[in-house]
């Protein structure tokens, strides 16, 4: 069986196309294929199918599409339900995207080894796998999310194939092709360099000079930047009369390999200190490190990684730990910005840009201006072509994040936020879940001390249960146990057992579970904020929109809209479906206690002690 996505999405069996129709079905298949056997969440599938206006029957429709695919593809392909989504294994079948990447990688390696004939053959084979615009018969949402990186990879492979042909002296045959490519990609400087080289070697120096000045004007008008180092070097060589020489191998594949890079002098190092006793999250950490590391293929795909999850799940700790582990890949430095102010409000992008620019250059070179567009242009110019890791922590939305993203593939970006962000569509997304009991116990032991936890196994198990897999809560309890060496954990376990006092106990110094949830609550629309406590009164079990509608005296569609808003704010989880295929929703136990604490108008930002008396009224809540 053969799968194709580099053009219309197709399935071929024994050389003949398998007939099935519908953009939605092609989208689900393509999304599963591009995920490469990793789980793609229901939420992401929903966005790729319907954008930001999904129908009320999302879960049922996803189930239907997956069932149809299973029937069409048969036993040769395995589609598994793996919460929070699906994963597909294609077994011995082939995927044109995988073949393209293998051939492109082999071609680049041959180019580096100066085997230009082999390089040209492999790279032409890679390009032959293309059959039009990627995902041509899928939804526009999938095409917008995934096609740009694939077309970028194709363009880079095309550049390398042309480099191999130039090295073999085929400049006259390339001139026409390159002229068309410069018209198609006026901002791709390497293609312009290659046409300048071909023109010069064909005795057309004046045309090559004109081509440079035209490119310089285009870059200034479109991006507000000067030509990059490679284009300027090509122009200097043209003026010096050295451009007609055969290129050196390193210049042929500029940017495809960087041997054991050393740290650049004066490179920014803004990462917060690593968590010394970081525990668990090994699968997520491995995925982050693989996604951030250079692929060695020069594919031109921007490295964007998003870590999502509710407050207190350890998104920042995981991101910072992964960033420290990957430092060797970023010799030009690491940038870090917390996009949330101490009071929980989002920071304005202009303020963040100034801080990042001061780390990239002397402070006197950062203009004193409120013109965000000017700061964005300067920021993208200074990050352009540099092997930087940019960690953007606590992102609140696309409007805040968009100006902070570089516009070239060399810098890698690691973003944390409570929900999926369309600005980083196509990114590797790591959706954190609460820790499993075993990992929770390990984190508690690391924070409290292994001996203290081992001496009270019953209390430790109870604490793990009451913290419900929330790393922030476990670290708070561990810190409190460690700070009281002459007190056993049993007393604290008993206090946590009472839901009335539990949130008050989950407080130590600056760490507080209640306070960590406040920004998510404050960011809700007033109508959603109003129903939040009432929904928590439905109980600790999963519930469908129909139950919420009955409790709130609202139409079911309106209730589901409010529930989805809470899920988007990471204050509610989507937990499977009921017997009619309708999605069910579930409160994390500590989020539910937080919501109940707001039920009768308690001040949401009062201190832990002041909240206790109000919480006592909730003892008999369901």
Image: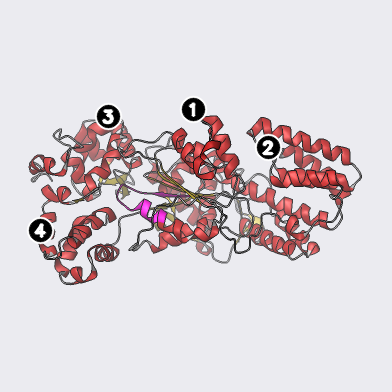
Tell me the number on the disc at residue 559. none
Q: Say which label, 4 or 2, has the lower sequence index.
A: 2
Residue 446 is at least partly visible in this image: yes
Looking at the image, residue 356 lies above or below residue 462: above
Query: Please, what secondary structure does the residue beneath circle 4 have?
Result: helix
Residue 302 appears at what percent x and percent y?
A: 57, 48
* Residue indicated by mark 2: 226
The residue that mark 4 highlights is 494
Q: Secondary structure at mark 2?
A: loop
Identify the disc placed on residue 527.
3
The kind of secondary structure element at disc 3 is helix
Q: Find the distance from the CA under tag 3 to the CA under tag 2.
A: 49 Å
Q: 236 left or right of 422?
A: right
Residue 586 lies left or right of residue 603; in this view the side is: right
The Cα–Cα distance between marks 2 and 1, rounded to whole angstroms, is 22 Å
Report the mark closest to the observer, 4 or 2: 2
**Residue at left offset 8%, top offset 41%:** 613
């Amino acid at each position: 069986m053969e799968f194709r996505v580099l053009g219309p999405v197709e399935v071929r069996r024994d050389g003949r196309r398998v007939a099935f129709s519908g953009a939605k079905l092609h989208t689900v298949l393509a999304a599963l294929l591009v995920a490469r056997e990793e789980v793609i969440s229901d939420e992401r599938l929903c966005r790729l199918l319907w954008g930001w206006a999904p129908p009320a029957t999302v879960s049922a429709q996803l189930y239907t599409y997956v069932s149809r695919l299973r029937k069409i593809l048969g036993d040769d392909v395995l589609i598994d339900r793996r919460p929070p989504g699906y994963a597909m294994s294609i077994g011995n079948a082939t995927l044109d995207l995988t073949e393209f990447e293998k051939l492109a990688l082999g071609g680049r390696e041959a180019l580096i080894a100066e085997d230009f004939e082999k390089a040209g053959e492999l790279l032409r084979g890679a390009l032959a796998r293309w059959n039009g615009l990627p995902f041509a018969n899928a939804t526009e949402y999938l095409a917008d999310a995934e096609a740009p990186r694939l077309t970028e990879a194709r363009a880079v492979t095309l550049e390398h194939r042309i480099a191999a042909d130039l090295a073999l002296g085929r400049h006259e045959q390339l001139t026409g092709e390159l002229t068309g490519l410069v018209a198609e990609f006026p901002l791709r400087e390497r293609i312009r360099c290659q046409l300048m080289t071909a023109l010069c070697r064909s005795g057309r120096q004046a045309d090559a000079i004109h081509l440079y000045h035209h490119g310089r004007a285009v870059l200034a008008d479109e991006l507000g930047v000067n030509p990059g180092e490679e284009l300027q070097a090509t122009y200097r060589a043209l003026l010096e009369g050295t451009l007609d020489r055969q290129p050196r191998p390193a210049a042929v594949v500029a940017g495809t390999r960087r041997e054991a890079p050393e740290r650049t002098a004066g490179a920014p190092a803004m990462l917060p200190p690593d968590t010394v006793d970081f525990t668990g999250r090994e699968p997520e950490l491995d995925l982050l490190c693989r996604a951030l590391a250079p692929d060695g293929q020069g594919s031109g795909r921007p490295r964007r990684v998003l870590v999502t999850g509710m407050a207190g799940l350890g998104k920042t700790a995981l991101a910072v730990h992964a960033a420290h582990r990957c430092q060797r890949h970023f010799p030009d430095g690491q940038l870090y910005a917390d996009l949330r102010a101490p009071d929980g409000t989002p920071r304005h992008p202009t303020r963040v840009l100034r801080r990042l620019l001061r780390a990239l250059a002397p402070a006197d070179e950062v203009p004193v201006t409120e013109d965000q567009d000017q700061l964005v242009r300067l920021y993208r110019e200074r990050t352009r072509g540099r092997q930087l890791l940019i960690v953007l922590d606590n992102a609140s939305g696309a409007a805040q994040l968009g100006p902070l993203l570089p516009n070239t593939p060399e810098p890698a970006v690691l973003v944390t936020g409570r929900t999926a962000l369309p600005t980083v569509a196509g990114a590797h997304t790591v959706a954190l879940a609460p820790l499993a009991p075993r990992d929770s116990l390990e984190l508690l032991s690391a924070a409290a001390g292994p001996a203290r936890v081992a001496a009270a196994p019953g209390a430790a198990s109870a604490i793990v249960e009451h913290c419900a897999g929330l790393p922030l809560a476990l670290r708070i309890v561990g810190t409190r146990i460690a700070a009281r060496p002459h007190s056993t954990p049993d007393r604290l376990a008993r206090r946590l057992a009472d839901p009335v006092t539990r949130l008050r106990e989950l407080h130590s110094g600056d760490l507080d579970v209640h306070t960590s949830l406040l920004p998510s609550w404050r960011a809700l629309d007033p109508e959603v904020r109003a129903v939040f406590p009432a929904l928590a009164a439905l109980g600790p079990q999963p519930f469908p929109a129909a139950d919420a509608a009955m409790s709130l005296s609202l139409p079911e569609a309106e209730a589901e809209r409010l529930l989805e808003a809470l899920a988007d704010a990471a204050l509610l989880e989507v937990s499977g479906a009921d017997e009619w295929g309708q999605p069910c929703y579930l409160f994390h136990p500590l989020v539910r206690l937080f919501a109940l604490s707001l039920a009768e108008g308690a001040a949401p930002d009062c201190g832990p002690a002041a909240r206790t008396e109000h919480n006592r009224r909730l003892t008999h809540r369901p």
